[in-house]
Image (spheres, grey):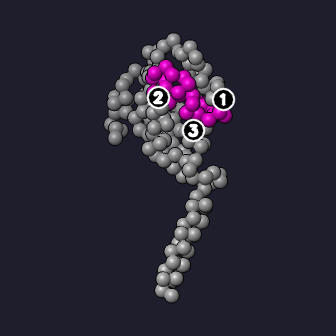
Amino acid sequence: MRIITVVLTACSLVLSACNDNKEATNQSGSVASDYLNSKQFRQLLWRVAEGWNNGDARAAADCFTKDAVYIEPPDQQLYQGRDELFEFFGGTEGRADPMNMTWHHLIFDEEQQIGTGEYTFVYKGRLSHGIVIVHLSKGKIRRWREYQYRSTTKWADFIGQSAF
């Protein structure tokens, strides 16, 4: 009798765990496996930077969803869809001048799949420091909103006493 009780208890625990896993969904109802964790988020944003830095528009564009929106409000830059982003990032011919993106801090809310990062970007000799906030869907960037400030100073001088 004691063995039966132990077996039934073990089966009950296993079934309970299976049911709990079925409930692992986010606010929009997506299965949790569609979610990135913080490490995967950092890897995704570094892949975007590597694509830009290497002149590989396809590698960078593939980090975005098919229906992605990339914006610098208020519509300073507005690109919609992966195909349009591919062309903006240089397309098959690449950009005439190299781009250089460096991330300084990346922060990610796994539950909401929203992240942000501070960066330095150089293109055609213009230096900008900025921040981007992104929303992910199924492991790719669905929304990208950036705010940047043109500067002549390096990152350390730009942030000055607020460094951490």
Between discs 3 and 1, the one toward the N terminus:
1
Q: Looking at the rendered structure, which numbered label has been put on residue 140?
A: 3
User: Closer to the camera, 61 or 10?
Assistant: 10
3 up-or-down from 95: above or below: below
Q: Position of residue 152 (x, y in %)?
A: 40, 20
Crowding at mark 1 (Cα within 10 Å: few <14, some 14-19, many 20+): some
The amino acid marked with disc number 1 is Gln
Q: Which residue is mark 1?
A: 80
- Mark 3 or mark 2, which has the lower sequence index? 2
Q: Mark 3 belongs to which amino acid?
A: Lys
Vertical placement of residue 6 versus 118, above or below: below
The boundaries of the magenta stretch are 48-71
Q: Residue 53: within the magenta?
A: yes
Query: Which sits earlier in the primary sequence, circle 1 or circle 2?
Result: 2
Q: Is residue 66 magenta?
A: yes
Which residue is pictured at 60% across the width and 65% down the height? Answer: 19
CA separation in Å, label 1 and label 2:
19 Å
Give the residue displayed 62% in from the left and 54% down from the top.
27
- Name above or below for residue 133 compared with residue 19: above
Q: Amino acid at mark 2?
A: Ala
**Residue at image x 49%, y 19%?**
55
Q: Position of residue 87 (x, y in %)?
A: 61, 20
- The residue nearer to you, when weighing 95 against 158, is 95
Give the x, y percent position of residue 14: 53, 69
Q: Nearer the viewer, residue 7 or 70?
A: 7
- Answer whether residue 85 is visible to the viewer in this image: yes
Q: Position of residue 20 (x, y in %)?
A: 57, 64
Residue 78 visible in rendering: no
Between circles 3 and 1, the one closer to the viewer is 3
Q: Which residue is mark 2?
A: 49
Distance from the alpha carbon under mark 3 to that under mark 2? 14 Å
Residue extending farthest top: 96
